[in-house]
Image: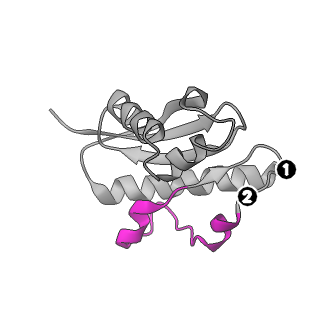
Amino acid sequence: MPFTQYHLLITCTKCNKQYIGKTKNSLRTRFTSHRFDINNDRGTSVANHFNLDDHTSQHVNIIAIDQLPGSDNISLLNKETYWIHYRTTWHQHQGARIFPHLYSLQVMSPCSPPFTPSHAFLYAFLSHSCT
């Protein structure tokens, strides 16, 4: 049976900030892992956000935004970069505030390898408002 890889969009229902990530696990397994990280304050970018004052794991909404067959890491990273770029571009067009760390990302086309190992750690929190 071929492997399936997913790209996820995690939205905070409290403040509408979003995280784009990837997994080779089932969505249920990845969601459980994120919830464990949040509940145990594991220091991941997702856990840090949902452990802010007035935020809880109950504010997590996770959906699959893409599914890729196979187990190719390069394709997974390329597509993750595409989704981050797509969401960043969309939010800039909508006039949303993009968090400062995104300005330092060198966003590459999903068709432009090679990628360095650091691309495995790309993430983006985006805001729907200018607050």
Residue 42 percent location from the top left of the image: 42, 48
- Identify the element where label 1 is drawn: loop
- Distance between the Cα atoms at labels 1 and 2? 9 Å
- Identify the element where label 2 is drawn: loop
Residue 117 in the figure: left or right of residue 44 = left
Question: Considering depth in this image, is 130 or 82 the residue closer to the camera?
Answer: 130
Q: Residue at x 47, y 60 (%)?
A: 110
Asked if the magenta segment contains residue 46, the reply would be no
Label 1 crowd bin: few (<14), some (14–19), many (20+), radius 10 Å: few
Magenta stretch bounds:
100-123
Q: Amino acid at mark 1?
A: Cys
Mark 1 or mark 2: name the one nearer the start of the chain: 2
User: Which quadrant of the figure contains the N terminus?
Assistant: top left
Residue 37 percent location from the top left of the image: 42, 42
Question: Considering depth in this image, is 117 or 74 the residue closer to the camera?
Answer: 117
Q: Which mark is residue 98?
A: 2
